Amino acid sequence: MSDGRAAKRVAKFIKPLRVKPGSTVDLTEDFDPRYKAGMKKRDGVELLRTGVSLLADLQARLAAQDTYGVLFCLQAIDAGGKDGTIRHVMSGVNPQGVRVSSFKVPSAEELDHDYLWRYAQRLPSRGEIGIFNRSHYEEVLVVRVHPENLDRQKLPEEAKGPDVWQRRYREINDWERYLTDNGIKVVKVFLNLSKEEQRLRFLKRIDRPEKNWKFSAADVREREHWDDYQEAFSELLSATSTPWAPWYVVPADRKWFARICAAAVLAHTLIGIDPQYPSLDGQARKELLDARRGLEAEAP
Ligand code: AMP
Ligand code: MG
């Protein structure tokens, strides 16, 4: 397939997943976690293989060009499939060009700073793909669903009012715009899992010894806040899908399909950058040719 046709195919494939900037999202109504674009798993697995090699080529060029960085943010409810998505989607790319950062409950040092500080420290450099496994969006998710997290953030009184979430949306949008303007592209994927599929995945984590480590009793307690999370996700998707950093809602009930979607969203961003291997100017080319002659002359 030609590059142009591949680019068009990727763009068409991800279009239904994009949250239109300015639209109001109701997660339970607007996005179906079981959607699979009429695809069969067998074809999907083949397509992912194609996507992974496309990503490998794009990433090599991104690194060589050394001008743009890509920040890939992954958010999901527990058992949404973030780890497996990262493992599969990035399976073909050069590990030297990728940095994965996972964000947990903030440390004392992190709480002693403004809330975006720890995320800013993990940003990708130019030429790099940075993956956020959870991201700054936890600051309007878990922190919102459990406000005691906000109390721990040691904010001044005037920064804690009822408008704190609206303010954070604005600050996040501004930050992402700043990054984009400076050559760090921001890509955001939400793995949208159904409540029933979460139940089934939790059961597997309990029943299979090799999966036990992935489960904690706290996960079931979080599940009781399912509706609060759906609401918090709906609001953030509505408020922070911007022309410079739109959200993609990826149907996550079928892992194989979620992985194709995530790969396609990342590929779409890289295709948009269209990174090129640097080409040499006249002087550099002459030096190269001189070096070549020297090496040839050394031949035994
Ligand atoms: P896991 O990804 O399963 O290892 O869990 C990480 C935990 O850290 C989750 O329960 C998140 O909700 C929590 N977490 C991540 N970011 C924050 C944050 N900014 N404030 C409070 N808890 C967080
Ligand atoms: Mg967990």
Image: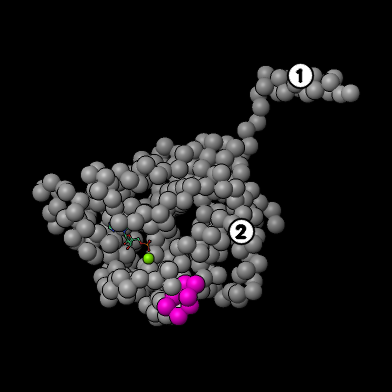
Q: Circle 1 sits on which residue?
A: 290
Q: Dot 1 surroundings within 10 Å: few (below 14), some, or many (20 or more)? A: few
Q: Which mark is residue 116?
A: none
Q: Residue furthest right?
A: 300
Q: Is residue 65 visible?
A: yes
Which quadrant of the figure contains the C terminus?
top right
Quadrant of the displayed image that contains ligand 2? bottom left
Q: In the figure, is residue 116 to the left or right of 156?
A: right
- Pick whichever, 58 or 205, lies toward us: 205
Q: Dot 2 surroundings within 10 Å: few (below 14), some, or many (20 or more)? A: many
Q: Main secondary structure of the magenta part?
A: helix
Residue 17 vs 226, above or below: the answer is above
The region drawn magenta spans 205-211
Q: Is residue 79 visible?
A: no
Residue drawn at x 60%, y 74% as measured from the top left: 41
Percent position (x, y) of residue 254?
Answer: 51, 74
Q: Circle 2 sits on which residue?
A: 51
